[in-house]
Structure formats: C-alpha cells, structure tokens
Amino acid sequence: MRFFYNLKGIIRHITPRFIPQSLLDSKIKGIFKRFSLESLKPRLEFYNKLNSHFDMIKNANELPQSCNFNERFNDKLPSVPSRLANLKIVKPDFATLGENSLKSGTAYYYDSYEFSRYFSDKLRWCHLFHDVNELVSYPAIVKSRPIFPHNETSVLLKLDKHRHFHFIKDSIKYENKKNILLFRGAVHQGHRLNFFHKHFSNKRCDIGHVGNVADYNKAFLKPAMSIKEQLNYKFLLSLEGFDVGSNLKWILSSNSLCIMPPPQIETWFMESSLRPGVHYGEIALDYSNLDCVLDYYLTRESEAKEIIENAHIFCSQFFNPHLESALNFLVLRKYFYLSNQIDVLPIEQELYES
C-alpha cells in the first residue's frame, strides 16, 4: 500500500544519516554471506554495465553537453516507427549524496535514498530522476534507458518501484477469459496514439484512454477499469509510455497473454531479456499484424498458456526482497568504486572488474 511505502520513506528520511552509514561494513559482509558471486553477477552486470575506472567530475560544469546521437557515435539509428529513430544524448544532473532530497520527487527520493543513505554524504554522483528515454552523456543513475548500443553510461536503479513493480495473483483461467484485446491507460505519446488511430474501431479490441483529456485523445476516452476487471480478458496490451509500460509487470504475472511490440526501453525489470513467443505475444512496431497475432494465439491455446507460464517464471526472479536490496546496494557500490571514490573488499573487486 502507498501509505506504508510513504511511511518507510519518511522514517528513513528522519533517521540521522550517521546511523545507516555506521552499518555499511556489516551490510556489505551480510550480502556476501547470504549470496554467492554467481547469483549476483549476471543481474549486477546488466544494471551497471560500467567496466572500467573513471574519475568522477567535481562540478556540473565539467559534464559533457547534450547532443544528437550521431554527433558522438557512428552507429545507424533505427528507422521510424522506432522510438529511437531520433535518439539523443542528454546531460544528467550532478550532486553529492548529501544533496539528495525530496526535490527529486517523492518516489525517486525514497527509492534512491533507501540505499544511498549508507554512503558518505560527500560522494558525488550523476543522475536523472524521471522517465528517461535517451542516452546520458556521463555515467549516471537512471530508472530507464534505451535498448541500444552505447547505453552503458545509463546505470539502472530500481526507481519509482511502487508504481511499476506491482505483481498480482490471477484466479481466472486463460481459457475462461474473453477473446478480446484490452487496454486502459493514458494516451499522450505518439506511439500510443498511432495504435489508437489504427485499432480503436477494431472489433477485436476494447481499448480506451483514461486520464487528462486533450483534443488529440478525447475521441478515445473510455471509463477506467480496475486491474481485477481487466483480468477477465484473454489478451492484455502493454504499450510503452514515456519510458516503459507501467502495466507490463502485472500483466506478465497474470493468466492473460501479454501482447506488445518489441521493447525499446528497459528498466530494473530487464525488458530486453523478454523474448517474443516465449514471454509475450509480439506485434510489429507499426501494429500492422495485430489481427494475425490474435488469430494465431486463439487457435493455439496451449502455446499461449506456455508463454504465460514462462512469463510467471520471469517475474519470479524479482520476488526475493533480500536479493533486490542487495543488487540495488551493489549497483551504487560499483558506481562509486569505478568512479574512484571508495575502496572495496577483494571479493567486490572480483565482482566489479571481471
């Protein structure tokens, strides 16, 4: 519940920082006593792709400026309708840990401070505490990053988790659900609007905009539906928003089949590890094959149910709160170590540098 999430954040906020900082050594030793390097390494390397040391800048004036992707790299960008067709590199924010505050927004502050509070206030970091769909010009802590080469400077932390990391129990069997594709969500971004323009009148779909109304989406307005109501439908659509789709996690933990285009943005949920036909039913980026995909799975119930089971297994790797906590902590620990700001244990060097 949001109340308890906020309560925990407030308690951490009012607790003097010297208390968690005094527990730093015992926390590190506890992590390596509980978990093996093999259980930590794959996900840690996914979240924090940095693999060499760098000297952390001393002030924001030293940050590389924002620019277009092709001003720095020669890789060819994907073509439209990919969201990454006009990919940019943006300048992150710079601060010391002691400057981390509620000005970043309640969720981003609570989720980052849960782990940053163990470290010295004087340590420096860069971050972007909002939905990120561009690359960053300097190693920075972010919630999301493009699934594209050269994203290693975007270091993922589990941020805005109360909104995004919501898993459910679904008691309705797949075969007892309606043969309709359902979506309820805010429709503001171009790629969501494109889907609605193509399929709002499709009789195979029940899709609707909920939330703030503007001229461009008022024709798509429909009543909101609870998650419980949405579980009556066999196919649930997940479309990326400003970064990822906030409904993706609960859909994949349901007994409905997730229908979505290939992900282009990834977060702590490791969206780029999801496989079409294994964890979800894939539609094209231009949404042109939607009817064919729905027909395919309507005639292959056992295959759809196998995909749903695979999705449940994928979700289960995020269910251990001790592992989640350890990985978030080590993401920051590795960041501060590779930026030449702290020393670490030999076992950590093996984890961060190999």
Image (spheres, rainbow, N blue to C red):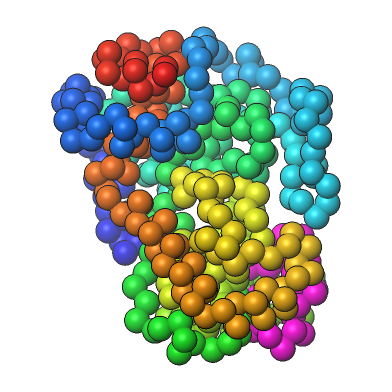
Identify the residue at horizontal 66%, vertical 33% (top origin).
149
Identify the residue at horizontal 57%, vertical 63% (top origin).
277
- Residue 343: image quadrant is top left
- Looking at the image, residue 325 lies above or below residue 299: above
Residue 37 image point, x, y percent: 29, 29
Numbered-mark total: 0
Residue 96 image point, x, y percent: 44, 22
Identify the residue at horizontal 34%, vertical 81% (top origin).
171
Residue in front for this viewpoint, 218 or 252: 252
Q: Identify the image quadrant of the C terminus.
A: top left
Residue 152 can be seen in this image: yes
Residue 159: in magenta span? no
Identify the residue at horizontal 56%, vertical 24% (top origin).
139
- Looking at the image, residue 334 lies above or below residue 56: below
- Looking at the image, residue 304 lies above or below residue 14: below
Residue 16 can be seen in this image: no
Q: Identify the image quadrant of the N terminus.
A: bottom left
**Residue 334 horizontal side relative to residue 191, left or right:** left
**Residue 210 horizontal side relative to residue 322, left or right:** right
Residue 115 image point, x, y percent: 33, 35
Q: Which residues are magenta?
A: 184-209
- Looking at the image, residue 271 lies above or below residue 302: above
Residue in front for this viewpoint, 130 or 276: 276
Residue in front for this viewpoint, 59 or 79: 79
